[in-house]
Image: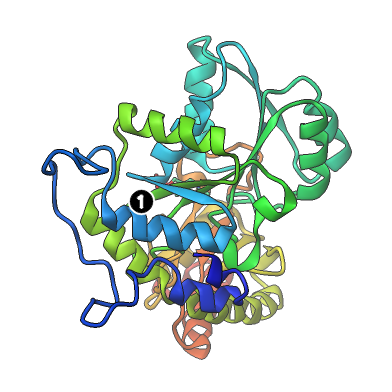
Amino acid sequence: MPEDRAHAPRTTVVTAGRPPRVPGAPLNTPIELASTYVAGGEVEYGRVGNTSWTAFEDALGALEGGRALAFASGMAAVSTVLDLVAVGDLVVVPQHAYQGSLQRLDDLEARGRLRVRRVDVEDTAAAAEACADAALVWLESPTNPALEVADLPRLIEAAHAAGAWVAVDNTFATPLLQRPLEQRADLVVHSATKLIAGHSDLLMGAVVTRDDELYEALAHARTLAGGVPGAVEAYLALRGMRTLALRVERAGSNAADLVQRMGAHPAVSRVRYPGFGSIVAIELHDGADAADRVVAATRLWIPATSLGGVESTLERRRRYATEAASIDESLIRLSVGIEDVEDLWADLAQALDHAADGGAATR
Ligand SMILES: *Cc1c(COP(=O)(O)O)cnc(C)c1O
């Protein structure tokens, strides 16, 4: 949609991926439920394409500045990108990143499919050096759940100098806050399950690229690996995406406000926040038990995994055996929603008070 390029992203997110403006036409691409089509058209079978995916892809592609491909989940998108790596080649990856991506890489490494090198993405010089013999540099910024920020331009330059592709998992930032393709990344990966769809009611993923060869390779792989989304999910994800700018703005301002208040609470030893976005992590003075008490004591905040929905959720990350041992036992990841910030703080403050008094209030 070339006419969208001139617009601000918060306009594009509303206008992109609409059907042609024809009298009598619907404003939104209707959900197309079909596995098979009358022969002779562009798409003959539902694993190859669907107009509901295309509408979603056009909108996300316009936002990120590339061509998008929709997948059944973020992990289907991640796995399809990793599958492009040749046998035995090296993938550089942040030591802290989405657990599913790291576990997938571990599995592939254990089977001899590829090699993995973990880096501290905030140590730019060391991370850049680690790219020297890589085939793929996988970046996630901010990282999950440490909220570290990578120096994307410098790491992308180092990776390209080494002849490596760069993929950036842009799930936490969204294209409203960060557009890695504009910084010359080759691929952007999303769990659209999170902020893009934004309502905790579906799973979907996406890959976006400006490189036609990569696009064709990924489209081919998607068709044959079969990790395709349902039409209803694609429709709902685009419907959710229409309010992405509003949600990102509100959740982001809520997060920035809560970061200040949490930082001043005596139970909190550290607040991790990259300065933008709606995902925050806190660490507590009194360890895992105190963190478990906080999570259990909230009434408005929902104890739940995942992130990026309209509702505020939280969880202690080390409750998963697979979470990196370098993540503090007390670290709670908060996904800040769009509720009233005073309500969010009142609930969090009473839960943190509860942690600070050792749970005495319930004894
Ligand atoms: C959730 C998530 C994924 C995986 O996405 P699914 O839709 O759950 O498969 C990948 N990367 C990040 C950063 C995520 O938060």
In-image side of 130 versus 234 (left or right): right
Can residue 53 be seen in the rendering of this structure?
A: yes
Q: Is residue 321 above or below residue 318?
A: above
Quadrant housing the C terminus:
bottom left
In the picture as drawn, the residue positioned furthest to the front comes out as 40
97 horizontally vs 41: left or right: right
Looking at this view, is 160 or 337 the one in front? 160
Which structural element holds mark 1? loop
Name which residue type carries label 1.
Answer: Met
Indicate the quadrant where residue 262 lies: bottom right
Tell me residue 339's x, y (percent): 44, 83
In the rendered image, is residue 151 in sight? no
**Residue shown at 52%/73% (left/top)?**
12
Q: Residue 334: horizontal and vertical position, in percent? A: 52, 64
On screen, 216 above or below 174? above
Q: Nearer the viewer, residue 120 or 76?
A: 76
- Farthest residue to the right: give it: 125
Query: What residue is rendered at 54% in x and 71% in y?
Result: 4
- The answer as to whether callout 1 falls within 8 Å of ligand 1 is yes
Is residue 326 placed above or below 51 in the rendered structure?
above
Measured as percent of width and height from the top left, residue 148 is found at: 71, 52
From the image, tell me which residue sits under label 1: 204
List x then y, in percent, for residue 247.
48, 77
Left or right: 259 with respect to 216?
right
Q: Which scheme is used to colour this image of the protein?
A: rainbow
Nearer-the-camera pick, 4 or 358: 4
